Amino acid sequence: MTKPFFYKTAAIAALLFAPVLFFTVPVSAADNSACMDCHGRKKAGFENAPAVKASDLASSRHAGEKCVACHTDATPGPHQVKPSKINCRDCHAKVTAKYDNTIHAKARAMGESEAASCQDCHTPSHKIMRKSDPLSSVYPFRLPETCARCHADPVLAQKYNFPQDVLKEYYGTIHGRALVRSGLLVTAVCTNCHGDHNIQKHTDPASTIGRNHVVDTCGKCHAGIAAVFKESIHGKKLAEGSALAPVCTTCHSAHRIVRTDAQGYQLQVVKECGDCHGEYLATYRDTYHGKITRLGYTKVARCSDCHSAHNIQKVSDPRSTLSPANKADTCRKCHPKANENFIKYIAHSTSGKQVQFRVMFWTILLMSALLIGTFAFFGVHTLMWLARLVGDIKKKRHEAEEEAAKSGQYYFRFKLYHRILHGIIITSFLGLVLTGMPMKFSNTWWATFLAHLFGGFEVMGLMHRFFALLTFLYFGLHLSYAARYIVSHREFRVFGPDSMIPRLKDLQDFIAQIKWFLGKGPRPRFDRWTYWEKFDYWAVFWGISIIGTSGLVLWFPEFFAAVLPGWVFNVATVVHSDEALLASGFIFTIHFFHTHLRPGKFPMDDVIFTGRISLEEMKEERPEEYERLLASGELESLKTEPTPEWLWNFARVIGFTALTIGVVTVLLIIVAIFSPLF
């Protein structure tokens, strides 16, 4: 066979079989332009073909590749059979092998077509970029929104039961804010924690965010902290396989990670510690530090300030920040002058056999007995009095007022000095209660409300100290007045009718008063001071001495630690708190009843504001004083004009304001005390 004959035969065969070859040979033999004739929307009649931009292909990671490199089973168009979905496995075998074991691939294998495939993440399909390209859908800056196409979809979230707000939560984290606001591409995005082609459920042992791997996952960025954590008591427990040992996400969460110096985190982390250490959280909340943090104040010792954050060790471990060798240095971070006495402070008031715990036990017991005993005794006294007064005193009071209005006879009972002093007492006492009770009942909503109302705990603390100084001021003024009075009145008798010193007649009056309550005798004849007024007077002395002294110890702990062991601060906290509760409860209930709210005085006795008492009221309430002043001729010198209208209005405004604050406060205290029972 000659060569020319062979060439002629081959040419004729090619012409005869060309149409058959065109429709049977894969398009790989053809140029991309053949595909773009239809998919580039250049050819009429193929407008419904999926559109592909030549420019996208030219700028993509796959630039230069033939269409059939991905669409391997495509035939020349119009396609008789729709090409199957792209299989990336032929070129990316290692990556797809990892993907096959992911939660997405397993879901697709079970028929869940919404589960992410290669094209779902690396989009758009014909413009796939390198992950380092800013236009890539898996570029760090764009990746969260790529993942959010599924994980922020409410329909998919409901169907597959996964969190819907992960993107919003992530953008609020320190990582998300660093990415969006600062453009830091080195910050953690979804794939840094969950992996890229090896994503698993967090419950899967192979998951990068599972308990066994999350420390190493976080350690890729936070290597130093991870190394420290692994040497801590928590890290060792985790390595031993403890299911209770915390990991990074236990304290920092997963999609809500914030700066550790953020106020919200610093307050929340105390609760996080309490999830595992509930007993210690409860005892911490009983301390000054714990109460303040509950009010939203962070500039005070929290769990991590004492125990450290990631290097937590047993207290018995020499490496612990609370070991005997290190405790003083730990306290000095906040209290520079902390000494060996200071560090004996009990951070968690748990039970124990040491002397400090026994003192705490007896202090709490005695203060509780004092509270219960005082309120029980005067509670019964008040109820008996109320029952007696309802029947007759109200009528007599109105008759006395009408008679006084006719005669217009009034006498000074209190000098201006005493009225001003009482005004200072009211101001300081209400101020101390309103700024102190939130500390006592820091677990209540109203405590937090008051703390914020006063501008935060720091401002509230300054106000509390100011009112304390005001208390010391009026206490000093009264002592100086009493001293001058005793010296200037040579005939003054310590146990005389003008003295506040209790005497035998007070006991006799008390017994007679009880008989009167029960209808067994006449009402006692009182002089200038009644037995309950003397009790109120000396209660103030007791209260200022106890509350004031304990308050100073708490105000200047480093100063007093020079001579007192630190556990005295715990005792001072209990005494200061319970005595303040006793004082406020007594004033706003018993004292208010004795002075203002009992029938015959209701709604308010304005004598302490106006200084005036009517002749009829003096005869009714204090007959012995009236007769004594009348006999000595002093009564006429005390006579004065009726209360001016402006003073009467002033007394009502001040008095009702104080009464309202007191009554509301005692109601809030009652709610706080009894709410845990329900």
Image: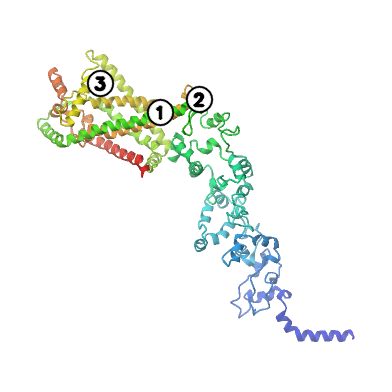
Q: Which mark is residue 362?
A: 1
Q: In the visual, does 352 lie left or right of 394?
A: right
Q: In the visual, does 28 lie left or right of 660?
A: right
Q: Residue at x 29, y 17 (%)?
A: 483
Mark 1 vs mark 2, CA separation in Å: 21 Å
Q: Amino acid at mark 3?
A: Pro
Q: Earlier in the sequence, mark 3 or mark 1?
A: 1
Q: In x, y percent, where is residue 295?
A: 42, 40
Discs 1/2, front: 1
Q: How many other residues sit within 10 Å of disc 1, few (<14), some (14-19) or many (≥20)? A: few
Residue 52: which quarter of the image?
A: bottom right
Q: Secondary structure at mark 2?
A: loop
Q: Secondary structure at mark 3?
A: loop
Q: Is residue 81 above or below residue 233?
A: below
Q: Secondary structure at mark 1?
A: helix
Q: Residue at x 74, y 75 (%)?
A: 29
Q: How many other residues sit within 10 Å of disc 3, few (<14), some (14-19) or many (≥20)? A: some
Q: Which mark is residue 341?
A: 2
- Quadrant containing the C terminus in the rendered view: top left
Toward the front, the furthest residue is 353
Q: In x, y percent, where is residue 335?
A: 51, 30
281 and 362: which is toward the camera: 362
Q: Which residue matches tag 3?
A: 502
Residue 413 can be seen in this image: no
619 and 8: which is toward the camera: 619
Toward the right, the furthest residue is 2
Q: Amino acid at mark 1?
A: Trp
Whether tag 3 and tag 2 are in contact, CB under 8 A, the answer is no
Q: How many other residues sit within 10 Å of disc 2, few (<14), some (14-19) or many (≥20)? A: some
